[in-house]
Amino acid sequence: MLILFTRYSAGYSSRPEGVSTLDKFKPNGRLQAQPGGVPIKTARYGVRMLRAGYLYLRIERRGLLEWEGYAVHPHGYLRQFWVMKPEAAEAKIACERGARQANNNLIWIKDAKNVKSLWYAFHPDPIDPQHLKREIEPNPAKYMQRFDVAGWQVGSTSQADSLEPAQLDKQVLGFAALSDEQVQRVGNEQCFGPMGMTPQQCVDAMTPHGSPQRRKRPSAIAHAIDRLSKESMMSKAIHSQPCSGRSHGAQA
């Protein structure tokens, strides 16, 4: 099973047209309209590709428990690392075209039908291995979100914080920006533009009410099952971006 992990974010525009565009991408359906129950007034919630940071998966299957860690590049690309060696967690992505495919944004879950549980969490910094094993591993519900992999495999697609592939360009700003100049413009007004385009950084304090990623419910999740319907569009966007994007930190 292929999964595309995304995140909730807060976007702002000083232009009425920009605010109107952001309004079109307010989370709806199975997504949280107010992630973590935090209301905002001036900004607008939306769903974006992952920002730079670290994604952790706690996977249990057939009585075996394993961890997978992924360093996230500012453009959303993933590079797996061993969670017990966080110093090796680097998001190095080659500039060559062949290494910048859409599936660099996806995670492949092996033997999906036998997955008993999958918990996931995003963090801006690598997590200390001892804290991961002693505190988070026995208490996943306290720190992580859950996705029913086996259930989705048999058709249970009405899960919280999830999307089906056909909804990506209607719910995820980065996908809509591929074919809509108004969305591109408002995306580039943010501290972190689509696929790491905006060449500036900002700090957590710029995110109204704190960074959504630091709360118990840190991210939305778009589940791309069997086939990512927008994969060819996504590849074009990836190939068109510079390799040296600097956007990272909290999304404002």
Image (tube, rainbow, N blue to C red):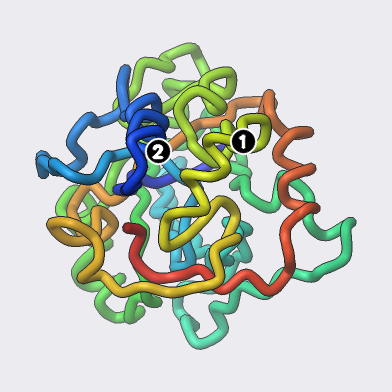
Q: Residue at x 50, y 60 (%)?
A: 68
Q: Quadrant of the C terminus?
A: bottom left
Q: Is residue 38 above or below residue 179?
A: below
The spot of residue 155 in percent (x, y) is 48, 12
Q: Residue at x 13, y 41 (%)?
A: 41
Q: Give the labeled residue for mark 2.
A: 18
Q: Residues within 10 Å of mark 2 (few under 14, many from 20)?
A: some
Quarter-of-image position of residue 18: top left
Q: Is residue 42 above or below residue 21?
A: below
Q: Amino acid at mark 2?
A: Gly
Q: CA distance from mark 1 to mark 2?
A: 11 Å
Question: Residue 199: in sight, yes or no?
Answer: yes
The spot of residue 150 in percent (x, y) is 46, 26
Q: Residue at x 78, y 56 (%)?
A: 100
Residue 90, numbered circle: none
Q: Give the labeled residue for mark 1.
A: 181
Q: Earlier in the sequence, mark 1 or mark 2?
A: 2
Q: Nearer the viewer, residue 50 or 132?
A: 50
